[in-house]
Amino acid sequence: MPRAVSGPAVPWNQVLAASAGESGAAVPASPRFPEIEERVLRYWAADDTFRASVQNRPAGENGSNEFVFYDGPPFANGLPHYGHLLTGYVKDLIPRYQTMRGKRVERRFGWDTHGLPAELEAMSQLGIKTKEEIEELGIAKFNEACRESVLRYSQVWRDYVTRQARWVDFGHDYKTLDLTYMESVMWAFKQLYNKELAYEGFRCLPYCWNDETPLSAHELRMDEDVYQSRRDPAVTVGCRLETGELALVWTTTPWTLPSNLAIAVHSDLDYVVVESDTTGRPERYLLAACAVARAANWSDFGTRRRSTTSWAIRRRTSCCTVTSSRRPMAPAWFTQPRHSARTTSCSVTGTASFRWSRSARTASSSSR
């Protein structure tokens, strides 16, 4: 980690003097750049150059000459790394440019003290791992532990940011745990809501069952074991239609099949009926036209051999002409009298499409 620069101030006319040789000598061909950088930093500190660059520029009437800049805060309980160095230069470049344009730019450093990283760090320090243990400890005590842990690396951050020659105000920093900050965020959101600029939407997010919370993209990269890709087993079932064909339905959650009441087709795709004896007897299958080639190349249906049979297209159809099934989709054991709710016949509806997956070795679709 970079160290803070301290020591006697050096007059500006000597800042770029040679780092070796006699005093007042010309800049050598091979200067010691770290030493020169430290001289510049010492001069800025002694001259209070950053503060002067702010105070010498008036804010103007009602802040008309201000360029407001709040640093997007890093997590305070984590150490800086190369990514912070790279973005830090951009965050320094824009305010410096606006300052050169005559604007008053007060640059307040910020600390992100909310979210899962802060909670996980506090849990690690407390030696607990589950939400139940947090509740046993007490929310108030846990929050206090989070407050104590979030700023443990603040001095390291200060040294790091200062060493990269970035001008920022640490003396008037802000923290997201401050009530004034949280209330200002709520106030700003209310203004957006009152102007009908806020809307409700839905999105798919990874979910952590241990912490009982959705995860952001950043939180997925916190540790190597936070998120792991894995291959789940896939199952393809054939739903017998009234016209006799088997509509192929794919799922990676086969335990939901007993309760499925429908399968889905896509309104914009064409479907075909193909004939094949890949299972040992002639059978007709309904699938998307664009998936026939892939199906023919990988149609083992539960075996580990590549199919050598051909898939002959017998008929083309659209989703509107796919008719409902005359048989229940659930297995017989699920529809015994001991179950109060019996599954209905399988029908075809919706907007999901059929596709094929080589990795699963079975037909696949987004319908379940």
Image (tube, rainbow, N blue to C red):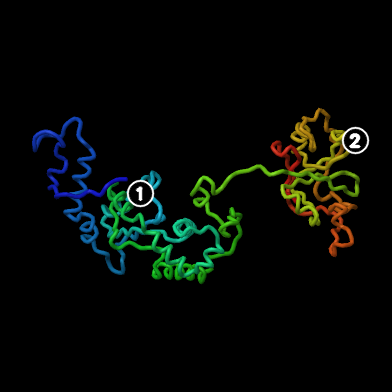
The residue that appears at 40% across and 55% down in the rendered structure is 77
How far across and how far down the image is residue 247, in percent? 83, 45
The answer to whether 305 appears left or right of 179 in the picture is right
Q: Disc 2 to disc 1, how far (Cα)?
A: 66 Å
Q: Nearer the viewer, residue 224 or 17?
A: 224
Q: Secondary structure at mark 2?
A: loop
How far across and how far down the image is residue 157, in percent? 33, 52
Task: Work out which residue is located at the far left of the displayed protein and give it.
Answer: 23
Identify whether 263 is placed above or below 311.
Answer: below
The residue that appears at 51% across and 59% down in the rendered structure is 128
Identify whether 249 is placed above or below 150.
Answer: above
Q: Which mark is residue 88?
A: 1
- Label 2 sits on what residue type? Pro
How far across and how far down the image is residue 100, in percent? 26, 52
Q: Quadrant of the N terminus?
A: top left
- Label 1 sits on what residue type? Gly
The answer to whether 58 appears left or right of 176 in the picture is left
The answer to whether 199 appears left or right of 356 in the picture is left
Task: Tell me where residue 283 sits by quadrant.
Answer: top right
Q: Which mark is residue 175?
A: none
The residue that appears at 20% across and 31% down in the rendered structure is 30
Q: Which mark is residue 282?
A: 2
Q: Secondary structure at mark 1?
A: helix
N-term mark: 2 or 1: 1
How far across and how far down the image is residue 52, in percent? 20, 58
Task: Work out which residue is located at the far front of the displayed protein and give it.
Answer: 127
Task: Tell me where residue 280 sits by quadrant.
Answer: top right
Q: Nearer the viewer, residue 174 or 2?
A: 2
The residue that appears at 51% across and 52% down in the rendered structure is 219
